[in-house]
Image (tube, rainbow, N blue to C red):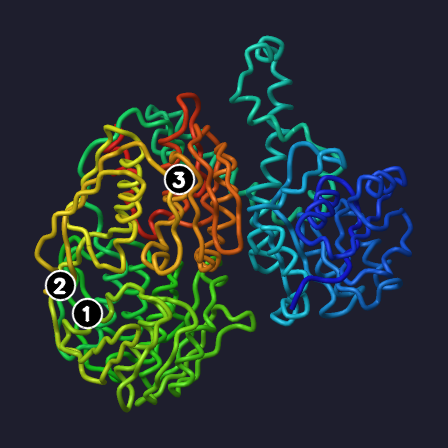
């Protein structure tokens, strides 16, 4: 379903006027209606070409397919009443920063299914019509708060607008939204006001004012906002702000106690540093890093170890939070699994169809799409019922693509109405053998079907549109399961996997961030021994070499006799632009964010194409990488399936957000090392690197220190 034919925007301040400008730029065929309290603003919007029709009268609501309320939050209830009278068939949404009270009032006034709470996280210190900019929503998070799945279906045209504007869609319930923004938006502006008031009441304020520099200015900046807006937000989100204030008072009490003692509170300060990393320019990069065990192989080794009939030993297992999620889910399904040293695990399986038992509760996959998709394939072949769920990021990722083939095999797999988690599975044994053609090149989807094929009544075949990493096929052979590969066709014959032992090779995707950093400057060097050299993963090495870096690979003995392993060293050089497209993309999909960062240092325009799958990862990596690069001072163009990055450019320090995406956090850390000499780059939410590489910052520091 495409975008709406007409949109009425009520309130033409920063958000409303920017929305009209963005609609004009991105969706020129959509009729734009502007409604402003002040007639002169409406006239300006019309004269500036932001809208096709403008005024101050409520009668303009009647011509809109979608009405967007961009007024102060305490004015929205009156406009909802007007919509009920004058636009009884229109869908209504908003851009306000408090949701629970508004969703309740909208439902009472409009009825079910006509209102979708919305909040683009795109505010600025400057407000008003003159502050508007068409690119305001590019790369921002746009929260929607449906009352149920039906709201998302009804509002599909508006969700298409959000996507077209380049925003990153986040779905959550209204109460969760209000609690979150109270902590990260509403409480901060109140604290900024409190700080200014407290400092100004100090007798030394005249002197302090003259001494105030960037630290105080940064903390006091929000106090310069609109008092009426702050008061309206405080009235409509008081409960969540009070809860956040309670938590802050606990932390202030801890600080007071630390200050009264002799330790100075170092541990207290350090804990916050882990959440917001600040990184500066690297003067020199040189060294060797042994990266953690490969995440993809670790997932698959655990799952197959649970399906063998006997005992399996695994070493150098990835410590990533994603892999821990897989282990926890297996234990919840009755698998005997025990650690016996750092990175070492022993587990017992009872055979395909019998190893897993009915879990007592929901299986928490955390942030791990690999856990959810591959475990779905395993559970599908067991006669049990299970529900798989995860965090907000995982709940955004597409799961219908795995439900379809497993359903064809006879399992009942039901995602949410949006096609995402939670995923409800009713397995059966045996399953029906199928031949399934993948809609996209996806190692996770391929693996889910192959693992389910172990429990089928005959050979199961997967047809790939392009090659993807083949860790599952290699490990199946290690378990003595018959696997035949003929071009893009992979066939597995049902068999009981045999027990095995495996020392997991290092994760090339984790090493890639450090290797890319080495490539950026002549004289820089990084060596990563013992990493996987699986052909489905080495695309990043090919690109680094094509860009001009010196890439040395020393092959070693295969892990388990099936996974190629070796040492990789990269030395920096002057870089040139390249094109990444076609069958290369599945072989470096996880490394594209850092390669985009590296492209800012290359001579010419680097193009990334055929990578639309990046929009369905932990975040919309295309939009967020583009926004982050621009914040760093780079020039790039965003396309539906990729990016064009123009280089070389001297990056500047910036405040960046990982958006809960571990690959973005690591890419921004590498970008920080490539910035100019002045300033530091702050990365909010950088602790999410634990999803794949918990000690990333320590290893990075060992190379740049």
Q: CA distance from mark 3 to mark 1?
A: 35 Å
Q: Nearer the viewer, residue 197 or 219?
A: 219
What residue is disc 3 on? Answer: 599
In this rendering, position of residue 544 left or right of residue 246? left
Q: Nearer the viewer, residue 192 or 621?
A: 621
Q: Nearer the viewer, residue 407 or 314?
A: 407
Q: At numbered mark 2, what does the secondary structure look like: helix, strand or loop?
A: strand
Nearer the observer, disc 2 or disc 3? 3
Quarter of the image where the N terminus is located: bottom right
Horizontal and vertical percent for residue 456?
A: 29, 87
In this rendering, position of residue 107 left or right of residue 350? right
In this rendering, position of residue 323 left or right of residue 502? right
Quarter of the image where the C terminus is located: top left
Sequence-earlier tag: 2 or 3? 2
What residue is disc 1 on? Answer: 475
Marks 1 and 2: CB-CB under 8 Å?
A: yes
The structure residue drawn at horizontal position 44% and vertical position 30%, both measured from the top left corner, is: 649
Q: At numbered mark 1, what does the secondary structure look like: helix, strand or loop?
A: helix
The structure residue drawn at horizontal position 27% and vertical position 56%, both measured from the top left corner, is: 537
Horizontal and vertical percent for residue 562?
A: 14, 65
Horizontal and vertical percent for residue 501?
A: 11, 66
Report the residue that reaches farthest toward the left: 557
Nearer the observer, disc 1 or disc 2? 1
Q: At numbered mark 3, what does the secondary structure look like: helix, strand or loop?
A: helix
């Amino acid at each position: 379903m495409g975008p709406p034919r007409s949109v009425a925007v009520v309130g033409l301040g920063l958000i409303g006027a920017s929305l009209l400008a963005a609609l004009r730029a991105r969706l020129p065929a959509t009729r734009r209606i502007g409604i402003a309290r002040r007639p002169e603003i409406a006239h300006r919007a019309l004269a500036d070409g932001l809208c096709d029709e403008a005024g101050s009268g409520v009668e303009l609501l009647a011509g809109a397919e979608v009405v967007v309320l961009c007024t102060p939050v305490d004015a929205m209830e009156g406009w909802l009443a007007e919509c009920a009278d004058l636009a009884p068939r229109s869908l209504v949404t908003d851009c306000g920063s408090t949701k629970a009270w508004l969703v309740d009032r909208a439902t009472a006034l409009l009825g079910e299914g006509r209102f979708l709470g919305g909040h683009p996280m795109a505010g600025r210190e400057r407000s008003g019509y003159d502050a508007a900019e068409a690119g305001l929503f590019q790369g921002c998070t746009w929260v929607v708060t449906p009352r149920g799945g039906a709201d998302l279906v009804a509002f599909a045209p508006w969700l298409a607008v959000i996507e077209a504007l380049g925003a990153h869609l986040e779905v959550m319930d209204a109460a969760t939204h209000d609690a979150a923004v109270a902590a990260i938006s509403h409480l901060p502006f109140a604290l900024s006001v409190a700080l200014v008031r407290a400092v100004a009441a100090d007798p030394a304020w005249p002197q302090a004012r003259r001494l105030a520099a960037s630290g105080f200015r940064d903390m006091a900046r929000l106090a310069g906002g609109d008092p009426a807006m702050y008061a309206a937000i405080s009235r409509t989100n008081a409960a969540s702000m009070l809860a956040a204030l309670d938590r802050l008072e606990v932390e202030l009490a801890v600080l007071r106690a630390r200050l009264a003692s002799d330790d100075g509170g170092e541990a207290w300060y350090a804990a916050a540093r882990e959440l917001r990393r600040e990184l500066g320019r690297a003067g020199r990069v040189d060294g060797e890093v042994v990266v953690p065990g490969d995440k993809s192989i670790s997932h698959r080794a655990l799952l197959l170890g649970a399906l063998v009939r006997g005992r399996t030993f695994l070493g150098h297992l990835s410590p990533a939070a994603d892999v821990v999620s897989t282990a926890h889910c297996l234990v919840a399904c009755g698998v005997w699994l025990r650690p016996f040293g750092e990175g070492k695990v022993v587990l017992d399986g009872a055979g395909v169809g019998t190893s897993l038992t009915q879990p007592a509760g929901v299986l928490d996959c955390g942030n791990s799409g690999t856990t959810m998709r591959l475990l779905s394939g395993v559970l599908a072949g067991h006669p049990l019922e299970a529900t798989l769920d995860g965090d907000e990021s995982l709940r955004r990722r597409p799961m219908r693509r795995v439900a379809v083939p497993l359903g064809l095999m006879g399992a009942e797999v039901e995602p949410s109405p949006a096609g995402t988690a939670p995923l409800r599975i009713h397995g059966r044994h045996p399953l029906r053998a199928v031949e399934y053609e993948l809609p996209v090149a996806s190692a996770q989807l391929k693996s889910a079907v192959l693992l389910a094929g172990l429990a089928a009544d005959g050979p199961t075949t997967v047809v790939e549109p392009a090659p993807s990493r083949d860790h599952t096929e290699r490990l199946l052979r290690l378990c003595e399961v018959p696997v035949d590969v003929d071009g893009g066709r992979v066939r597995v014959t049902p068999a009981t996997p045999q027990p095995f032992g495996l020392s997991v090779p290092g994760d090339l995707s984790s090493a890639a961030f450090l290797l890319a950093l080495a490539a950026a400057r002549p004289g820089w060097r990084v060596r990563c021994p013992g990493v996987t050299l699986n052909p489905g993963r080495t695309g990043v090495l090919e690109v680094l070499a094509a860009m001009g870096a010196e890439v040395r690979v020393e092959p070693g003995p295969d892990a388990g006799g099936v996974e190629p392993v070796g040492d990789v060293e990269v030395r920096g050089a002057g870089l040139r632009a390249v094109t990444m497209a076609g069958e290369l993309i599945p072989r470096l999909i996880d490394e594209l964010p850092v390669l985009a960062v590296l492209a800012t240092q290359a001579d010419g325009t680097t193009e990334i194409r055929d990578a639309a799958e990046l929009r369905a990862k932990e975040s919309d990596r295309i939009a967020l990488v583009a926004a982050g690069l621009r914040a760093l001072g780079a020039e790039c163009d965003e396309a539906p399936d990729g990016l064009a990055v123009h280089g070389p450019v001297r990056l500047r320090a910036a405040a960046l957000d990982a958006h809960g995406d571990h690959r973005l956090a690591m890419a921004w850390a590498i970008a920080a090392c490539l910035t100019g000499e002045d300033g530091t780059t702050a990365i909010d939410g950088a602790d999410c690197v634990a999803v794949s590489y918990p000690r990333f910052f320590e290893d990075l520091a060992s190379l740049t220190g």
